[in-house]
Amino acid sequence: MCGIAGIVSQSSAVNAELFDALTMLQHRGQDAAGIMTNEGHRLYLRKDNGLVRDVFNTDEHMVKLRGRMGIGHVRYPTAGCSTSAEAQPFYTNTPFGISLSHNGNLTNAEELKQELFLQDRRHLNTESDSEVLLNVFAHELLQRGALRLSPEDVFAAISGVHLRCRGAYACVAMITGYGIVGFRDPYGIRPVVYGVRETPNGLDYMIASESVALDALGYEKLADIAPGEAVLITADGKLYKRQCAANPIHSPCIFEHVYLARPDSVMDDIYVYKARLRMGVKLAEKILREWPDHDIDVVIPIPDTSRVAGAELAMRLGVNYREGFIKNRYIGRTFIMPGQAQRKKSVRQKLNPVDLEFRGKNVLLVDDSIVRGTTSREIIEMAREAGAKKVYFASASPPVRYPNVYGIDMPTSSELIAHGRSVEELERLLGADRLIYQDLGDLIEAVRAGNPAITRFECSVFTGEYITQDVTAEYLSQLELFRSDSAKAARRRAEQTVIELPNSV
């Protein structure tokens, strides 16, 4: 769920525009941010933990990012550790000087680390799978043996990446002095788009995770990068593209439409806003079908991602829609916060109920999904404290029962409240008078209606079926050991010990 961006400009420095692009993608990662730019044969880098506005918080930071070509990244960590060394872009000197930003997760990262060390003789400095991906691309480019790069060399290297790397990856890489290349895994799991803008000096090009970044900077979207495809933009403003995978099968992540993406984005020719409207319609149809004599007085969304579905749901049910929770804009997305304790604390800091909308009413709360259950349980309790007579809860997506291995922070079954539990058990655990989940078939229909050409979506968090077909029980067990909340907390404590040690000597 990270955010990536890359710009090649013929008219001006790209530092400010990359800053703006990352700000537009901040919802995809709040842990760290970074920008690397290129002028001639020199590279300029600024990256650190924190929000975009905090990492680039002085004029000096921006002025030093020189050049008309660059890439950027916002991170929310699903692998590796939380030190600033894990912030992206990553860089390797050989060959040519390559930097890379990555959104997704490699499912064979450990195997590739061994190959890179033992066979390719390449050094890795972090635990990040993004650095693995960078070095695989660099090695494949080195194998071409070219003294002067051509688009054919770059596309051949991407083909090599597809043969070696498994999992999800949407990437933008910069080759010093030559250009930037955006590419996507053969399933197209994570999103990435590219666009163009006319200037008096020629065409500027931009690659980004979501179309909102293009819109904000005046770029016209040309297309989504197709599964397995690579798009190369050279420093002199020429664009090349090539299908680099043998058997691409378009299978985008459906959870992007449920929660991750902004509603004003367009992904794979599907308007996220309209997909969420249709989720509200499907949910209303289910309620009317299974609970025709419902006693719902008011529908209240959990801001922000459920507002669109909630409004449409209320209209279809013919009941009032009200904004019953006021959101503190200065608290981040609780889903991507580290640790249950911080998520629970942040819910009440983030949301405050408007008592008069709850008092004496049967309230239907609507959220995009229920993952760990921390937020939902707290919100239901807040609704009761505000005076609600009954509290019903509806999820615009099906129960999240299985880990995600493709770049979303749902790493362990034990942390997913719906895993191994019935809806009735979940009602008791969450404290709801009634719990309504979207059916998976209805969710798929709601999203696919925007682009019927897509025949399959990545739905593993709902089904436990992993489209890369390489996810074993052993892999999931290792994932739980490494990426659970408790494992991450232990690594953070270890990192703090390492940082604090010199001061205690």
Image (cartoon, grey):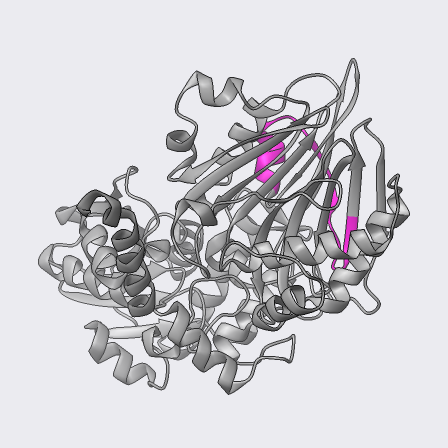
Q: Quadrant of the rendered structure where residue 12 is?
A: top right
Q: Is residue 275 magenta?
A: no
Is 121 situated left or right of 20 in this image? right
Is 345 situated left or right of 113 in this image? left
Q: Quadrant of the rendered structure where residue 11 is?
A: top right
Q: Is residue 197 above or below residue 312?
A: above
- Nearest the viewer among 503 and 474 is 503
- Nearest the viewer among 158 and 463 is 158
Please name the residue shown 79% across and 34% down the image.
Answer: 178
Q: In x, y percent, where is residue 40?
A: 73, 24
Please name the residue shown 46% across and 23% down the image.
Answer: 61
Please name the residue shown 37% across and 81% down the image.
Answer: 419
Q: Is residue 222 magenta?
A: yes
Q: In x, y percent, where is residue 20?
A: 52, 28
Q: Is residue 161 above or below residue 441?
A: above
- Nearest the viewer among 39 and 384 is 39
Q: In x, y percent, where is residue 492?
A: 30, 57
Q: Magenta segment range?
A: 211-230
The residue lying furthest to the top in this view is: 200
| Residue 419 visible in the displayed image | yes
